[in-house]
Image (cartoon, rainbow, N blue to C red):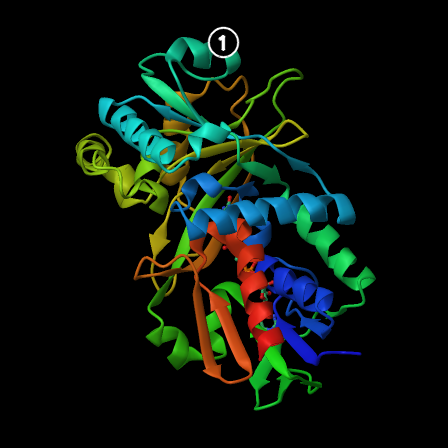
Amino acid sequence: MSRGRVVVIGSGILGLAHALRARDEGFEVTVLERDERPLGASVRNFGTLWPIGCTFGVERDQALFGVQRWRELAHAADFWIADSGSLTLAYREEAWSVLGEFAEARALGGAERSGDFELLDPHAVARRWPAVETAGLRGALWSRAEAQVQPAQALAALLRYALARGIAVHCASLVSRVEEDHVETSDGRCFDFDQLLIAAGADMRLLFPREIAAAGVQRCRLQMLRTTPQPPGFQLGAILVSDLTLCHYPAFRACPSVQALRERLARELPQHLADGIHVIAAQHPDGTLTLGDSHEYGAEFSPELANVIEERILEILRSFARIPELRIAARWEGIYLKSMRGETQVVVRPRPKVTLITAMGGLGMTLGFGLAERTIASWVRA
Ligand SMILES: Cc1cc2nc3c(=O)[nH]c(=O)nc-3n(C[C@H](O)[C@H](O)[C@H](O)COP(=O)(O)OP(=O)(O)OC[C@H]3O[C@@H](n4cnc5c(N)ncnc54)[C@H](O)[C@@H]3O)c2cc1C
């Protein structure tokens, strides 16, 4: 027997994570997607599942749960996933201090005992990761929890899996109106709900503009690149990041040396900081590297992608990785909503039966399944 009717707006990762969980709990689920297939942030990201970016405690647990759920679904829905781990490389003294403080705090918290993190000197790094640039390297933090999927492949497989699990998926179905107990699409179809989940990504503001504005979220545009396949045999060996990334994710905020690192980077790389650039390099099974990104905030953005941002991303990449063939095969942008209050997920309930999920910023692939778990549990209890 059905627990009730759930309508989900949006077939990005947040929409699908909620749809699948609701189905598991016995709801009758309908997903309405504006486009012919998901084309939002969920297919434009690195595909990195990134517990190391999450603050220790509840959020990291949510991220680890997410990685585990991705593994199960990769098996069930048949898409690629790799337990790549991540290597955070420190070139500036201040960055090395941040890594030391981070690892120490984790050890006190008990994580290091399970071998989650390892601080490595440059020799150890060079032995295990020949692609890393060792000139000026002070050391690195190896973390084994991070994993990778190919976003477009994974989302397509999840959509097929949702259909096979009995979820009704209607693509080319733009929801233009939300009423008390039903939604309407722009071509006049109506779908009744007992619970409505809105996961409309960067277009969230179109359905409940006042509530979204009050939630303190802003739009953020990111620039991304993909290289041509690297020569056979070349392996990055892990997801690579370096000094700039330590100023980006909430996980490192509590490290006392972050401030000194930020000040030094502001002196040495002011334009990179102004463009919100930090660089992640992730290799996919076809040998290509996904590279990015930059962060531009605002209500609207220029339609152009700036060459200078691409040059700055590649400059940072060369400072930490020796890439045999740095030829760019594709460039694209992604847009997400981000909390101006530093929250990593924003849940708004404008009406008793309506839940808006937004502002997961750069961690939605990592945290989405954990959030879905909580949302659906609250519906089951209701
Ligand atoms: C460049 C980039 C890199 C990132 N890297 C990572 C990463 O490595 N790891 C990580 O964890 N996270 C990463 N993220 C964040 C992650 O991609 C997002 O948090 C996540 O994809 C958001 O998912 P979503 O389902 O909310 O949005 P989306 O994927 O944007 O999906 C929203 C969907 O709603 C549909 N829609 C909108 N309005 C309507 C409507 N009215 N009716 C019907 N359908 C509608 C859209 O067509 C779209 O398909 C990155 C994001 C970007 C942009």
Q: Amino acid at mark 1?
A: Arg
Nearer to the camera, 380 or 238: 380
Looking at the rendered structure, the number of numbered marks drawn on it comes to 1
Q: Tell me which corner region of the image, top left, top right, bottom left or bottom right, holds residue 111.
A: top left
| Res. 133 image quadrant | top left
Helix, strand or loop for disc 1: helix
Q: Is residue 186 visible?
A: yes
Asked if one can make out residue 151 in the rendered structure from this viewpoint, the answer is no
Ligand 1 shown in quarter: bottom right
The residue located at (67%, 77%) in the rendering is 6
* Residue 49 coordinates in the image, percent (x, y): 54, 43
Left or right: residue 348 versus residue 166 is left
Q: Nearer the viewer, residue 97 or 182?
A: 97
Q: Position of residue 293 (x, y in %)?
A: 42, 41
Task: Work out which residue is located at the far bottom of the displayed protein and give it.
Answer: 180
The C terminus, quarter of image: bottom right
* Crowd rating for badge 1 (residues with CA inside 10 Å; few <14, some 14–19, many 20+): few
- The vertical placement of 249 against 279, above or below, is below
Residue at 58% of width from left, 44% of height from top? 67
Q: Residue at x 73, y 58 (%)?
A: 159
Residue 32 against residue 182 in the figure, above or below: above
| Residue 283 left/right relative to 72 | left
Residue where numbered disc 1 is placed? 127
The image shows residue 41 at horizontal and vertical percentages of: 54, 55
Task: Residue 308 in the image: state x and y as whole percent.
Answer: 36, 38
Is the distance from the Cβ of mark 1 to the nearest ligand 1 atom less than 8 Å?
A: no
Vertical side of 19 occupied by 57: above or below = above
Q: Quadrant of the N terminus?
A: bottom right
What residue lies at 53% left-to-right and 35% top-to-bottom?
A: 145
Pick the front one: 376 or 36: 376
